[in-house]
Image (cartoon, grey):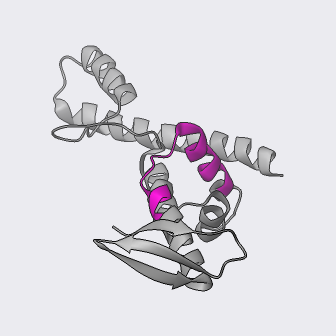
């Protein structure tokens, strides 16, 4: 990877980078572009902390575009898009380390299924699965309305 080897103060119009074994001379515009690109590449390798993820989602929910948010915070637009998609899919943006098969139900749904199955011991699995669907639908409506109310009051 190329790296800046030496350059003088801002008044100097040239700098040197080392790429492999040889030094390459760059003039001001190319040197500045190299420095900016290097900063962007390094920024992409860092993980976003929970607070920053929350700020990104909050700004997107307030109606800002993904491009505006990514430029404000200084991350790639693809990261913003991926974060927003994950938030819309399951409402969660925290990093989780998973191995093996992904979960189909959330822990709350697991508890609900356990309670429903205990109540309906004489029934087959069909009523339990339909109860889960109605639970998901009802809780989605209630949670989403409360979330939207809370965020619109903040954004207004």
Q: Is residue 142 visible?
A: no
Principal SS element in the magenta part? helix
Q: Which image quadrant is residue 9 in? A: bottom right
- In the image, residue 62 sits, relative to residue 93, either above or below, namely below
Q: What quarter of the picture does the N terminus occupy?
A: bottom left
Look at 68% across and 55% down and name the residue there.
59
Q: Which image quadrant is residue 15 in? A: bottom right
Where is residue 64 drawn, in percent x and y?
69, 64
Look at 84% across and 52% down and name the residue there.
156
- In the image, residue 111 sits, relative to residue 29, either above or below, namely above
Look at 71% across and 46% down and name the residue there.
151
- In the image, residue 24 sits, relative to residue 84, either above or below, namely below
Look at 65% across and 55% down and name the residue there.
61
Where is residue 116 drawn, in percent x and y?
31, 21
> Could you say which is closer to the camera, residue 134 or residue 35?
35
> Could you say which is closer to the camera, residue 121 or residue 14?
14
Taking the image as shown, residue 44 lies to the left or right of residue 54, namely: left
Answer whether residue 58 is magenta in the image: yes
Region in magenta:
41-59
Q: Looking at the image, how many numbered discs can be counted on the residues?
A: 0
Looking at the image, which residue sits at the far right? 156
Where is residue 126 drawn, in percent x and y?
21, 36
Where is residue 70 drawn, in percent x and y?
59, 63
Answer whether residue 35 is magenta in the image: no
Taking the image as shown, residue 142 lies to the left or right of residue 127, namely: right
Q: Is residue 127 visible?
A: yes
> Could you say which is closer to the camera, residue 127 or residue 16?
16
């Amino acid at each position: 990877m190329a790296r800046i080897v030496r350059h003088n103060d801002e008044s100097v119009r040239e700098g040197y980078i080392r790429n492999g074994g040889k030094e390459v001379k760059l003039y001001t515009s190319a040197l500045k572009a190299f420095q900016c690109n290097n900063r962007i590449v390094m920024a992409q390798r860092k993980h976003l902390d929970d607070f920053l993820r929350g700020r990104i989602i909050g700004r997107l929910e307030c109606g800002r575009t993904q491009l505006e948010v990514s430029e404000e915070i200084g991350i790639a637009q693809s990261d913003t898009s991926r974060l927003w998609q994950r938030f819309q899919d399951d409402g969660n943006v925290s990093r989780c380390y998973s191995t093996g098969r992904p979960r189909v139900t959330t822990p709350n749904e697991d508890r609900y299924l356990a309670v429903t199955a205990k109540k309906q011991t004489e029934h087959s699995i069909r009523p339990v699965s339909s109860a889960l669907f109605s639970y998901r639908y009802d809780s989605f409506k209630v949670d989403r309305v409360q979330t939207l109310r809370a965020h619109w009051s903040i954004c207004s």
